[in-house]
Amino acid sequence: MQSIWNNAFFLSINLIPTYWLYLNKAYGYTKEQYLSDMSIKVKRDIQNRIKQAKAKGKEYFTPHRVQKMQNAWNASS
């Protein structure tokens, strides 16, 4: 469900994230810059979680996690 209710979704329905409002007032960020930075951050965080799991000797994409991802995908379509 995180992929449905992300920052891009809220910006598309004209709900402004507070962090964007801060960045806009302080640094003049546009909504496009904000979305770009946030998508890069999310991708980096996921890669870090996968690396941490591998370092601990654990599998990140467990069968249970894959099943939850498939259920979320089916529910969204």
Image (spheres, helix red, strand yellow):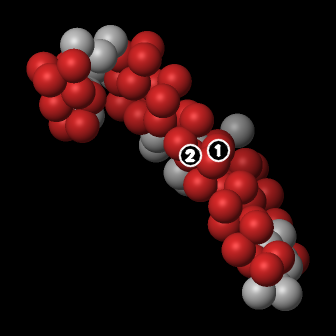
Cα distance between the residues tagged 2 and 1: 4 Å
Name the residue tied to disc 2.
Answer: 42
Quadrant in the picture for residue 77: top right
Rendered view: 22 above or below 33: below
Percent position of residue 36, x then y: 51, 24
Q: Residue at x 63, y 48 (%)?
A: 44
Q: Amino acid at mark 1?
A: Lys
Percent position of residue 24, x then y: 21, 19
Q: Secondary structure at mark 1?
A: helix
Q: Residue at x 77, y 87 (%)?
A: 56
Residue 40 at least partly seen: yes
Rendered view: 77 above or below 75: above
| Cβ atoms at labels 2 and 1 below 8 Å apart | yes
Mark number displayed over residue 65? none
Rendered view: 42 above or below 69: above
Q: Amino acid at mark 2?
A: Val
- Give the side of residue 75 with respect to residue 33, left or right: right
Which sits in the foreground, 43 or 13?
43
Percent position of residue 3, x then y: 58, 44
- Give the side of residue 39 with respect to residue 76, left or right: left
> Dot 2, crowdedness within 10 Å: few (<14), some or many (≥20)?
few
Q: Residue at x 82, y 85 (%)?
A: 58
Percent position of residue 16, x then y: 24, 27
Q: Secondary structure at mark 2?
A: helix
> Dot 1, crowdedness within 10 Å: few (<14), some or many (≥20)?
few
Which sits in the foreground, 37 or 66?
37
Which sits in the foreground, 51 or 74?
51
Rendered view: 70 above or below 28: below
Q: Residue at x 23, y 27 (%)?
A: 23
Name the residue tied to disc 1.
Answer: 43
